[in-house]
Image: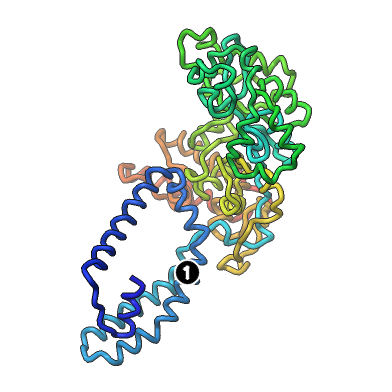
């Protein structure tokens, strides 16, 4: 294809043998098949393509401008030498259209990393995904000790219940991948992990596989002494990790994987066994981030974490202040919306520097990662650009943490007055006895659904004028106005 383009530029005749034509068609077909396979096999990575575009868009734009500039001589030459008037006009319009598009496209480029240094948020806290699995066998005590060395704030793990009721750490449904069960219990290789007693589980080695399989290709960089310690690791109990978390003052979050076999003694009471273990550990209840799907049984003092996106008001009503979402399933605007409502966002599983940097710029509160040792060494994002506005907007004088005091942020998005908007929203709901959207279009501009009565629309506009008058009277004040003043 490159050769064909070169022939075209040099206006040389292109003679293709039928074998060349077939080869080109086969290549195109294979490329399409490869794209389909990638879409199927790497679905989660493919879903993050919009995030990738946010990061690369400024650089693609620079490359596109350079490319259009390079081919300008070729385009102009063809326009001047062509004897066809229609061709000259069409090519001129097309090229100018591309140039204008590239000139205007920066207005549509939105990336959280287009930001000045002084407005960069704090570095996201780190949650060690199954500990530090790049430095030690996953879900072992050594792995969580490495997490402490990485300055992570939280241990993230998976909890199952042994047949005799001991909570232990294991992600997979079987022990085949991460232990030597083929040697110790060759006839039970495919048995469910929770079908073993704790005494049987303690016989398994949970470290040798790490050195043999080298899951992250990091084993060779570890000191010999570290490798020897890793080789001797056993399956950890939840009590052991809670003891370490209490000692190092780390938070603990886990997925509770209940037994699938109905004959298991703890089939219906596995979460009770886990709660009992936590209470017996005497760890501060606030250090437990309760993620299991038992939303109505969150023990007192535990911080409930929700694994889905709900309206911030609903989360506040349920006293949920942390959500746990895959990083490709949440936008910068949603992160900002939750932050305004004092709801922290944790995203998982982040292992690449560019993803971590983008989420850092977006002001994510924390990330779950396998690479805590890498992110711990990052002092700043790997890249960020200065804003298009060049700092023309001042910092919000209300000291609310907003990046810039543009009109939208000061009048609507500022956290200092956000509570007032909610108070007004509740008052309007009481007055009109119907749902009033808590959106800027409605609350600030008075735009309501078409089925509203004319007199209700008129009354809403009057109330909004009165409210905005109160707001402008305290325009430069660091304090929020109230409905009474």
Label 1 belongs to which residue? 61
Above or below 469: residue 258: above
Q: Secondary structure at mark 1?
A: helix
The residue located at (34%, 89%) in the rendering is 77
**Residue neighbourhood size for the residue with mark 1, other residues' Cα within 10 Å, grouped as few (<14), some (14–19), many (≥20):** some
Q: How is the image coloured?
A: rainbow
Q: Nearer the viewer, residue 317 or 87?
A: 87
Q: Quadrant of residue 80?
A: bottom left
Can the viewer see residue 419 in this picture? Answer: no
In the current view of this chain or complex, which residue is farthest to the right? 247
Relative to 312, 91 lies left or right: left
| Residue 427: % across, % down | 50, 37
| Residue 229: % across, % down | 73, 32
Q: Nearer the viewer, residue 328 or 316?
A: 328
Q: Quadrant of the N terminus?
A: bottom left
Relative to 89, 148 lies left or right: right
Relative to 385, 25 lies left or right: left
The residue located at (78%, 27%) in the rendering is 247
Q: Quadrant of residue 2?
A: bottom left
Q: Nearer the viewer, residue 401 or 213?
A: 213
């Amino acid at each position: 294809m490159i050769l064909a383009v070169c022939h075209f530029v040099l206006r040389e005749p292109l003679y293709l043998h039928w074998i060349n034509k077939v080869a080109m068609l086969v290549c195109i077909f294979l490329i399409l098949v490869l794209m389909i396979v990638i879409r199927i096999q790497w679905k989660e990575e493919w879903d993050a393509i919009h995030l990738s575009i946010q990061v690369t868009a400024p650089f693609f734009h620079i490359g596109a401008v350079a490319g259009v500039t390079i081919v300008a001589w070729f385009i102009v030459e063809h326009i001047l030498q062509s004897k066809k008037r229609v061709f000259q006009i069409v090519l001129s319009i097309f090229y100018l259209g591309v140039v204008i598009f590239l000139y205007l496209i920066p207005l549509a480029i939105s990336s959280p990393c287009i930001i000045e240094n002084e407005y960069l948020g704090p570095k996201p806290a780190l949650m060690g995904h199954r500990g530090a699995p790049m430095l030690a066998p996953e879900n072992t005590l050594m792995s969580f000790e490495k997490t402490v060395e990485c300055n992570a704030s939280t241990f993230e793990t998976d909890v199952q219940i042994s047949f005799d009721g001991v909570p232990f750490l294991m992600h997979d449904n079987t022990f085949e991948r991460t232990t030597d069960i083929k040697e110790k219990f060759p006839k039970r290789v495919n048995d469910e992990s929770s079908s073993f007693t704790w005494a049987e589980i303690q016989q398994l080695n949970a470290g040798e596989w790490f050195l043999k399989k080298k899951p992250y290709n990091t084993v060779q960089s570890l000191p010999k002494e570290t490798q020897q310690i890793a080789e001797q690791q056993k399956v950890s109990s939840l009590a052991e990790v809670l003891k370490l978390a209490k000692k190092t003052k780390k938070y603990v979050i886990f997925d509770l994987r209940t037994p699938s076999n109905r004959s298991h003694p703890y089939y219906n009471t596995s979460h009770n066994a886990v709660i009992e273990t936590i209470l017996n550990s005497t760890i501060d209840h606030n250090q437990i981030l309760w993620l299991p799907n038992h939303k109505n049984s969150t023990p007192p003092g535990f911080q409930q974490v929700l694994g889905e996106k709900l309206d911030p008001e609903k989360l506040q009503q349920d006293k949920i202040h942390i959500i746990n979402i895959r990083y490709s399933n949440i936008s910068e605007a949603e992160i900002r919306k939750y932050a305004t409502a004092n709801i922290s966002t944790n995203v998982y599983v982040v292992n690449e520097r560019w993803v971590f940097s983008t989420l850092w710029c977006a002001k994510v509160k924390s990330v779950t990662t396998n690479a805590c040792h890498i992110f711990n060494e990052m002092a700043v994002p790997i890249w960020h650009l200065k804003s298009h506005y060049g700092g023309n907007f001042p910092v919000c004088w209300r000291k609310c943490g907003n990046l810039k005091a543009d009109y939208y942020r000061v009048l609507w998005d500022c956290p200092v007055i956000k509570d007032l908007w909610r108070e007004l929203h509740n008052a309007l709901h009481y007055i009109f006895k119907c749902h009033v959207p808590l959106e800027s279009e409605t609350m600030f501009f008075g735009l309501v659904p078409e089925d509203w009565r004319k007199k209700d629309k008129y009354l809403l506009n009057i109330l909004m004028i009165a409210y905005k008058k109160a707001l402008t009277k305290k325009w430069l004040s660091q304090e929020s106005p109230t409905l009474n003043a």
